[in-house]
Image (cartoon, helix red, strand yellow):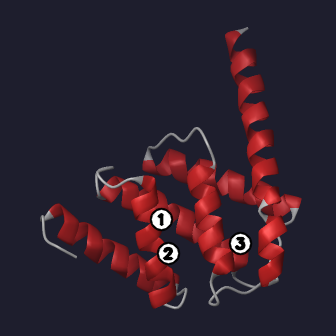
Amino acid sequence: MENNILKFTMNDLQEQSSEKLMKLNDESINYGLVLSEKEVNDIMKNTGETLKKIGRIETSTNALEKVITIVYSSPYTDKENYVENINDMQELFYYFKNQVLDLLSDDEVIEILEKAYDEKCGEIVKIQGFVEEFATQFKLGGHF
């Protein structure tokens, strides 16, 4: 019985989250970028897999919504790399949070990733390198 309640709650959360992500299309369309329902579902699935792989739990889509905003509002994103960059950036977000031991808030990590996305021209490999370097310096107590 409890398992059924949990499934219902998770399905409800998934539906609400998908609706919130679809609503982002109202703004992203101004950049020529729109997510289909299938793409939103794929992003949600990828997010779940990423959280499981990295060992994190998330109860809202707030961080994912901000990541999507970074990606669609950048001049370095186009239709061909939109969904892939969203998935890569949300993975980097959670990885980054782990690497800095959650000592930086979600908004601080988002701000750093947004700056890196633009400075590295949306090139995910370069952004990954930046995240690694930042995290190393952060752990060593250095200033970045």
Question: Percent from the top left, x then y, of residue 32?
Answer: 82, 83
Tag 2–tag 1 contact (CB < 8 Å): yes
State the residue at coordinates (87%, 65%).
36
What residue type is disc 2 on?
Answer: Glu
For mark 1, does the 10 Å Cα neighbourhood hold few (<14), some (14 to 19), or many (20 or more) residues? Answer: many
State the residue at coordinates (41%, 63%).
109
- Counting residues from the start of the chain, the first of labels 3 and 1 encountered is 3
What residue type is disc 3 on?
Answer: Val
Which quarter of the figure has residue 4? top right
Kindly identify which residue carries mark 1. Answer: 110
Give how far apart the Cα atoms at labels 3 and 1 are: 18 Å
Left or right: residue 131 compared with residue 85: left
Give how far apart the Cα atoms at labels 3 and 2 are: 16 Å
Tag 3–tag 1 contact (CB < 8 Å): no
Residue 114: which numbered mark, if any?
A: 2
User: Between residues 85 and 106, which one lies in front from this camera angle?
Assistant: 106
